Amino acid sequence: MSRYPPPPRNYTALPTGPVRRGPRDVRHDQRLPGLLSGVLLLRLEALDPLHVGTGGLAPVRRGGGGVALALDLVTQNNAAAIPGSSLKGLARSTYEALAGGCDLHGSCNPRCTACLLFGYVERQQTFAGRVGFEDALAIKPHTVPTVAAPLPQAFQPRRAVGRRVYGPPVQGRATPVRALAAPAGTRFLSRMTLRNVSPQELGLVLLGLGVDGSFAPRVGGGRYHGLGRVAITVRRARLREGRQVRPETLRQDRLARQVEAWLEAAEPTSNGREALTVLRNPGGSR
């Protein structure tokens, strides 16, 4: 019997279905016709306190005096930051749900569309992803408050439940844990890099990040306790299509129209459309 108590059930498992296989690896050494290469500037706004931990502890002052330890927060230049690896993990997990990614068991061969877009490492075979994310840095300096929340175990060891999305928090029975967190309202900037990405692939990535405004994904720790919702928008794009010599910069109205076109080009699987419904309403999410 596990010594870990079961977590509060405030998550919904995302539907899984047939894996959509890709035709082949897409080369990186040259730009290919009809595919996009360049950079999107993303803005992320925290709708809840946001905690991406370092794995260590930090001393914090308690209200009544004295010092306590809290889970430390990833920072750069004394400001909160979201590692690019966290953003790529978020993007990949939702892309897999929408596009029919890895089945989470055994080898992914032939490669699924998610492996061919985000990359893979398996034994002696490696492939660099065609989508990447830079660290998201807070736009303005801010104080980092401490949140005290009951953070129960988010999983049962040896009992994988697959991809899931968290709804509103429920009260856990665990002792509250202090954690440093970026406050709600904190805004971050990040860059998403593209190399030979189709409009359909880009549309699915943006759809999975909630860029259409239909939901706000969660990132970081404490998602099962209501932390980490972020609203993501595209602020600028600088892209080449195929072998186009000069990149084109898109802003404001032109950018909005192009983002809408990418979203319309997205083609989720039938299970992906069910997953999108869950993402938009995870068990009555607020």
Image (tube, helix red, strand yellow):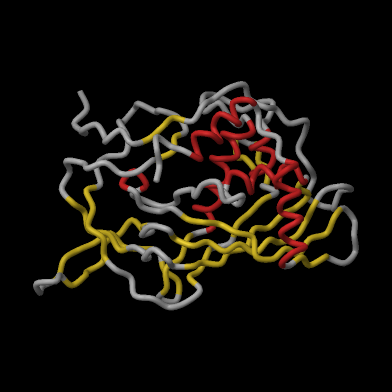
For residue 75, what is the image quadrant?
Answer: bottom left
Residue 79's place in the image compared with 52, above or below, is: below
Residue nearest the viewer, comparing 277 with 3? 277
Residue 10 lies, in percent from the top left, at: 33, 36
Q: Is residue 159 left or right of residue 68?
A: right
Picture coordinates of residue 47 (x, y %)?
42, 58
Q: Between 202 and 85, which is closer to the camera in this rendering?
A: 202
108 is higher (above) or lower (below) than 63: above
For image coordinates 55% across by 57% down, the residue present is 232
Horizontal side, residue 239 vs residue 12: left or right: right
What quarter of the picture does the N terminus occupy? top left
Image point (34%, 43%), residue name: 168
Q: How many marks?
A: 0
The location of residue 141, given as percent across then percent down, is 43, 78
Residue at point 21% right, 33% down? Answer: 4
Answer above or below: position of 26 versus 146.
Answer: above
Where residue 17 appears, as percent x and y from the top left, is 58, 22
Is 168 situated above or below 267? below
Residue at left 76%, top 38%? Answer: 25
